[in-house]
Amino acid sequence: MSWPAGYGRIVLDETDSTMAEAARRAGTLAGPEWVMARRQTAGRGRRGRAWANPEGNFAATLVLQPREAPGVVALRSFVAALALFDAMVAVTGRADPFALKWPNDVLLNGGKVAGILLETHAGGALAIGIGVNLVAAPGAAEVEAGAVRPVSLMAETGAAVGPEDFLDQLAQAYAVREASFVTYGFAPIREAWLSRAARLGETVTARTGTSETVGRFETVDPSGNLVLMTAKGRVGIAAADVFF
Ligand SMILES: O=C(O)CCCC[C@@H]1SC[C@@H]2NC(=O)N[C@@H]21
C-alpha cells in the first residue's frame, strides 16, 4: 500500500486525544498531517461525549489547512465519511454491510463501527478526528439510550486489521476523495454519500439538545444539511443526532 504524496504521518504510542495532539501541533505543520495514536487516555466524541479507545482500535486525526469559507470546509465531514467507507471496503473486500449515517458515522450491519469529529482552530486549521472500532466496541449500556448499537469490525466481519494498516488504507482513500472535493466541489461527494446513506426515504428523528424533529429523510442538501419532510413541511437541519 503506498502512502499518499504530500501527506505527513506521526504515530504515537499514547496521547490524551489525537484531537488535543492536533491542536498542539497545528501551528507547526507545513502541510496535511495524519496524527495517529495506538492508545488515547482521553478520547472524545461528538457533543462532548467520551470516546473509548482500547488498544487495537483506530484513533487518528488528520490536520489540514483549508482555504475555503467555513461552510465549505465543514463539508469535509462528508469527504472523510466517504473515505472511511472506502477504507472499510478495501480492508474487508465487501461494500454491502456498510452504510453512512448523517452526518458522518459509518454503520456496519446496522451498528456504529466508526465516528468522525471535526474541530477548527484559530489560524484556520481543520482537525478531522476518526475513531474506528477495529477490535472492540463499547457495550450498549455505554452509549446514549436509543443510539445505534456499537459494533466492531472484527466481531462483525472477522477481519483482523491493525491500526497502522488501516491508516495506510484510509490515508490513501482520503487523498483520493480530497482531490475530488478540491477539483469538482461537493456535488460528486454528495452523490456518492447519498448512494451509501442509511435510511434514506425512511422516517427518522433528529435531536439537538433542545429540539426534536421527526420526518422522512429526503436528502442531504448542497450545504450538507439533513433534509426531512415533516408534518409541517420540508426542514433543513444543520446539526443534530439522528435516531432511527
Ligand atoms: O462521536 C463520534 O462519533 C466521533 C468520535 C471520534 C473519535 C476520534 S478517535 C480519534 C480522535 N481523537 C479523539 O479524541 N476523538 C477522535
Image: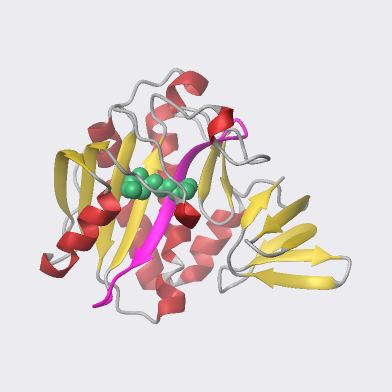
**Picture coordinates of residue 123 (x, y %)?**
23, 78
**Quadrant assignment, res 59:** top left
| Residue 21 left/right relative to 130 | left
Looking at the image, which residue is at 30% across and 79% down?
67
Comparing 103 with 80, the one in front is 103
Comparing 15 with 94, the one in front is 15
Looking at the image, which residue is at 36% across and 71% down?
183
| Residue 40 left/right relative to 243 | left
Q: Is residue 29 visible?
A: yes
Looking at the image, which residue is at 46% across and 77% down?
71
Task: Please determine whether, in this image, residue 9 is positioned above or below residue 25.
Answer: above
Q: Quadrant of the C terminus?
A: top right
Task: Please determine whether, in this image, residue 178 is positioned above or below residue 43.
Answer: below
Task: Please determine whether, in this image, residue 14 is positioned above or below residue 204.
Answer: above
Part of the protein shown in magenta: 108-124
**Picture coordinates of residue 35 (x, y %)?**
21, 49
Comparing 92 with 12, the one in front is 12
Looking at the image, which residue is at 44% across and 69% down?
74
| Residue 103 left/right relative to 27 | right
**Quadrant assignment, res 214:** bottom right
Q: Reply yes or no: does residue 121 show up in magenta.
A: yes
| Residue 163 left/right relative to 243 | left
Q: Reply yes or no: does residue 45 show up in magenta.
A: no
Q: Quadrant of the N terminus?
A: top left
Secondary structure mostly taken by the magenta-highlighted segment of the chain = strand
**Picture coordinates of residue 93 (x, y %)?**
44, 29
